[in-house]
Amino acid sequence: MRKIVAFFLGLGLVAAAFAGLALAVVLGVISASVMLVLQMTGRLQPAMVRTARAEDRTRGASAPRDYRVWNDGRGTIIDM
């Protein structure tokens, strides 16, 4: 009796594993197709990124920062 129960429990675990893999494949295909449709229709646009902070553009690139960094031999110190 225990062997029969163990056999059916093993089959159930195998079936659950295959169902999980099938669900992962289906969700992957659906998400990839949604991303492709959004990319093709132009609705998926990357966010604009600024390359420099506003105060860096006004002060210039060689202006000193608001903080200092140095190493005193025991560790790096950042003074803000």
Image: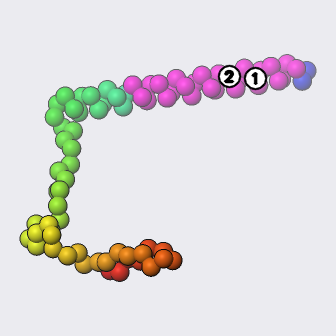
The stretch of residues the image draws in magenta is 3-29
Looking at the image, residue 39 sits to the left or right of residue 58; the answer is right
Q: Please tell me which residue is depicted at 19% across the width and 41% down the height of the picture.
A: 45
Whether the magenta-drawn stretch holds residue 28 is answered as yes
Disc sitting over residue 14 in the figure: 2
Q: Real-space Cα distance between discs 1 and 2? A: 6 Å
Task: Tell me what residue is drawn at x 31 percent, y 78 percent.
Answer: 68
Quadrant showing the C terminus: bottom left
Pick whichever, 36 or 2, lies toward us.
Answer: 36
Whether label 1 touches label 2, CB < 8 Å: yes
Q: Name the residue under label 1.
A: 10
In this view, 45 is above or below 49: above
Taking the image as shown, residue 78 lies to the left or right of residue 49, namely right
Helix, strand or loop at disc 1? helix
Q: What amino acid is at disc 1?
A: Gly
Query: In the current view of this chain or complex, which residue is farthest to the right?
Result: 1
Circle 2 residues within 10 Å: few <14, some 14–19, many ≥20 = few
Viewer can see residue 54:
no
Neighbours of disc 1 within 10 Å: few (<14), some (14-19), many (20+): few
* Magenta stretch secondary structure, dominant: helix
* Colour mapping: rainbow
Of 71 and 24, the residue lying toward us: 71
Q: Pick the residue in front: 42 or 47.
A: 47
Where residue 56 appears, x then y in whole percent? 15, 68
Across and down, in percent, residue 22 comes to: 52, 23
